[in-house]
Image: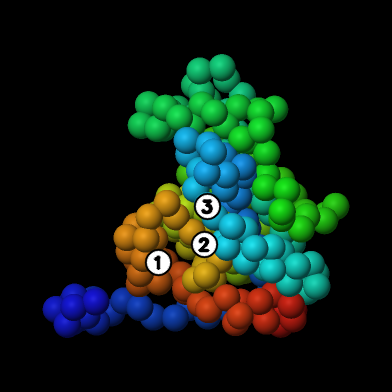
Amino acid sequence: MSDDRERIYERAGMDNAIGYGDSPALVVVDLQKGFTDPECALGGDLTAVVERAGRLIEAAHAGDVPVVLTRIVTDHPEGADLGIWIEKIPTLDVLAAGGEWAELDERLPRADGDYRLDKKQASAFHETELDSMLTAWDVDTVVVSGCTTSGCIRASAVDACSHGYRPIVPEEGVGDRAEGPHEANLFDIHSKYGDVRPLEEVLTYLEAPPQ
């Protein structure tokens, strides 16, 4: 980052750490085949992200931390349940319920207690049951992994902050279609909404949370 931009952000008082809370949940965002398989028009090679998200899931299981795995699914033949978003990205219609591209990536190490959450918009919180579940679990910290950094990760992190949770984004545990948007949004999330932390640090936290 340039010296001028550093001064601008420092003057604004940004980049403060909010830290980890005592009761986390792990939200794995949209690691479904439509995004992790390059054969899909929406997809890319997110093999490394899937592997790291898998490590986060296993750490959460070890620490008895709730795990929520989200996916974007349309139940309407024309994607009308995705609202105006389908007009911006018409290829979202491939994420049809019951289709291959809507399914979660089978490489993720899921357990019986993990919760699959279907959503219609970028944020995992938008008109879903996520906030109610986190409240029931007395969660104060949301670890957000998955894809894409510039889209659903950012939207979910912003909404986690808006709902009063501490958003933690493991830097190596999220991915995007291009490096520029990925890096820019990690910088912006860390500056304004949550903490972007090293993967190994987050793994240690999930394995033995303060609770």
Quadrant where the C terminus sits is bottom right
Tell me the colour scheme of the image. rainbow
**Badge 1 vs badge 3, beta-carbon distance below 8 Å:** no
Q: Residue at image x 78%, y 74%?
A: 63
Mark 1 — residue? 186
Quarter of the figure that contains the N terminus: bottom left
Spatial separation of the CA atoms under disc 3 and disc 2: 12 Å
Image coordinates of residue 94 in percent, x first then y, are: 54, 28
Query: In the image, residue 174 lies at what x, y percent?
Result: 52, 62
Residue 133 is at least partly visible in this image: no
In the picture, residue 143 is in which quadrant?
Answer: bottom right
The kind of secondary structure element at disc 3 is loop
- Choose mark 3 or mark 2, whichever is in front: 3
SS at circle 2:
strand
- The residue under label 3 is 45
Q: Determine whether, in the image, residue 118 is placed left or right of residue 166.
A: right
Residue that badge 2 annotates: 174
Lateral position of residue 26 relative to residue 14, left or right: right
Name the residue type under label 3.
Answer: Asp
Tag 1 secondary structure: helix
User: Residue 4 location in percent, x, y?
Assistant: 14, 78
